[in-house]
Amino acid sequence: MSDQPAESPAPRRGRPGYDQETVLRRAIEVFNRQGYDGTSMGDLAKELGLTKSAIYHHVPSKEHLLSAALDEALDGLTTAVDSAAAAAPGTSAYARLRTVVQESVEILVQHLPAVTLLLRVHGNSEVELAALKRRRAIDEKLSALVQAAVDEGALRADIPPDLISRLLFGMVNSLVEWYRPGGPVDADVLAASIATLAFDGLALHQP
Amino acid sequence: MSDQPAESPAPRRGRPGYDQETVLRRAIEVFNRQGYDGTSMGDLAKELGLTKSAIYHHVPSKEHLLSAALDEALDGLTTAVDSAAAAAPGTSAYARLRTVVQESVEILVQHLPAVTLLLRVHGNSEVELAALKRRRAIDEKLSALVQAAVDEGALRADIPPDLISRLLFGMVNSLVEWYRPGGPVDADVLAASIATLAFDGLALHQP
């Protein structure tokens, strides 16, 4: 499993010792630790052991780093949803939904810091508003997939489809609160466990 | 459904127009909006239309308000867990767990702002560390209840009990991200839907 974004930012002015990728990783860490709004370019410079003026040789602005981080998370989630939509003809909505849930978990684990940052964004700037817009588009595709699975008779109809979608992905997203790579639970086990809990349920009706 | 904490803070010096309860509600709103660390007593005074010195007639300190808010959330959740433990003899662990899940949702909805604040606390002070300690004690009781339900053969054993507990209450806690009282989903429907999804599963195995 790679920790790289789906598309790395285009190479820009760099200094020996800090490629753009490293600067982005460290910036995301700091944003998650002390909040994006609570982080200054001076804080980022300090984190990297650079002077406040030297950091501008690495990054044009704080917003640029935020934008790259949010795109990393959103690109991964969009790919997961769109690849399910493009599944082999005849694949049921149920099968596609179950795949999306598992793949969303894998994306979240692979891009944990970037997804964590995404989930904390509240629309305080143009960059954040654009990210929220992309997030809503993903949510709408997920809701449509849930509705299609209900319509084909594969999912229970006694819970409103919008609520199903919120609860499913609320559970997936809650992983950012506690999951840490290298811990006792592997990403595959986690993804399969979440799909089992959500679709098959925890109760053993047949002993 | 009452919006009051289980135990209201003891009455203290008040001014006409602002009882302690109102001051606490407004403070929790501001803490959730701009972050506890990012809120000063001056901000709270401004919110209440008071001068910076007058606010000290209402509250001794910012920490006092945080402590009251976190206790409100923790008292509710502790009561939900402990009342399940004290259920009628012969009640299965499964039935008790299912009740705790539903009651946790009800508590979260009744005390949404206070629980939201609790879930954002990261242990930056004595008050926050004490709250995290109480939260861990609740989590341990929940894990024990899940384990007991697995042991009695009522819950599937192919997902580790600790993971079940995290996923279940991760889903419940994710409500703070989107649930708003007065919206299209009633608290009862929400609580029942979450229990149905988690225990019975979304898939319709029998058409």
Image (cartoon, coloured by chain):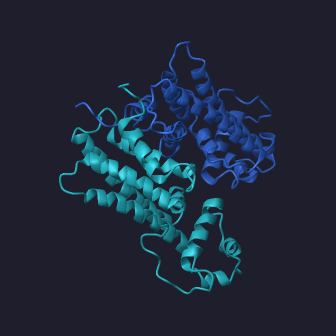
Chain colours: A blue, B cyan
Between residue A44 and residue A165, name the one nearer to us.
Answer: A165
Task: Work out whether B127 lies above or below A159.
Answer: below
Q: Residue at x 34, y 57 (%)?
A: B81
Residue nearest the viewer, comparing B109 with A195: B109
Say if A178 sits above or below A19 in the image: below
Image quadrant where one finds the C terminus of chain B? top left
**Can residue B126 be seen in this snapshot?**
no
In the rendered view, would you say A45 is above or below B7? above
**In the rendering, at what x and y percent does residue A197 appear?**
39, 35
Q: Most extreme residue toward the top, as rendered?
A: A89
Q: Return the residue found at the far left.
A: B90
Kindly identify the residue that appears in the image at 64 percent across and 39 percent down: A25
Res. A58 in view = yes
Q: Position of residue B63 (x, y in %)?
A: 55, 72
Q: Residue at x 58, y 74 (%)?
A: B22
Q: Would you say A135 lies left or right of B154 here? A: right
Q: Position of residue A61 (x, y in %)?
A: 79, 44
Q: Quadrant of residue A199?
A: top left
Nearest the viewer among B68 and B83 is B83
Quadrant assignment, res A111:
top right
Residue drawn at x 22%, y 41% is: B151
> Which percent across, then down, holds residue B43?
69, 71
Q: In the drawing, does residue A56 fall left or right of residue B11?
A: right
